[in-house]
Amino acid sequence: MENLFGGNKRWRPKKNKIVNKISRINSFGPLWVDTEYLWIISLTKEEFEAIRLKNIENYDIIEAWNKMWIWKSTFANIYNSAIQKISQALVYGKILEL
């Protein structure tokens, strides 16, 4: 079956992920600099949930990806992306937006 781009590769539909908790705080960042001149890094709901499950609830990776109803590799990708974004915000003084 051909897709819209002319190739034979089939794209899987995006699966909804289970997110149980959303933060009441929507951004973090340095207070000493005008926010107009800072870079903003956005953390998705899925990335926030992955960090919460793994680091706050102390689930191992198997329990965490089962809670979100996703594959282990997908969870690992989401978690690694979140860690990278948080690290950049801390090291470079960027605003982290949820």
Image (cartoon, rainbow, N blue to C red):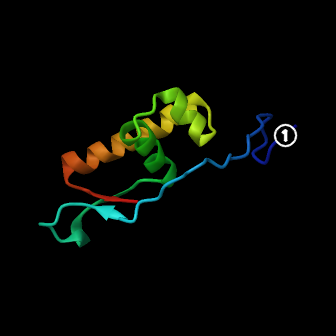
Q: Specify the quadrant of the image occupied by residue 87.
A: top left
Label 1: which residue? 2
Residue situated in front as seen by the camera: 74 or 11 = 74
At x 41%, y 45%, the residue is 52
Q: Position of residue 25 (x, y in %)?
A: 35, 65
Establish if 34 lies above or below 81. Answer: below
Q: Is residue 7 left or right of residue 47?
A: right
Report the front residue among 24 and 46: 24
Q: Is residue 48 left or right of residue 69?
A: left
Q: Position of residue 67 (x, y in %)?
A: 57, 39
Q: Quadrant of the C terminus?
A: bottom left
- Residue drawn at the location 45% of the way across and 33% of the way down: 59
Question: In the image, is residue 9 above or below residue 86?
Answer: above
Query: Measuring 53% from the left and 31% from the top, which residue is drawn there?
Result: 63
**Amino acid at pointer 1:** Glu
The correct choice, above or below, for 87 with respect to 28 in the image is above
Q: Residue 6 appears at what percent x and percent y?
A: 79, 42
Residue situated furthest front in the rendering: 57
Q: Nearer the viewer, residue 3 or 15?
A: 15
Of residues 44 and 88, which is closer to you in this image?
44
Please state the horizontal and vertical placement of residue 89, each as a whole percent of the image. Answer: 26, 51
Which residue extends farthest left? Answer: 32
- The residue lying at 46 percent from left, 42 percent from top is 50
Q: Secondary structure at mark 1?
A: loop
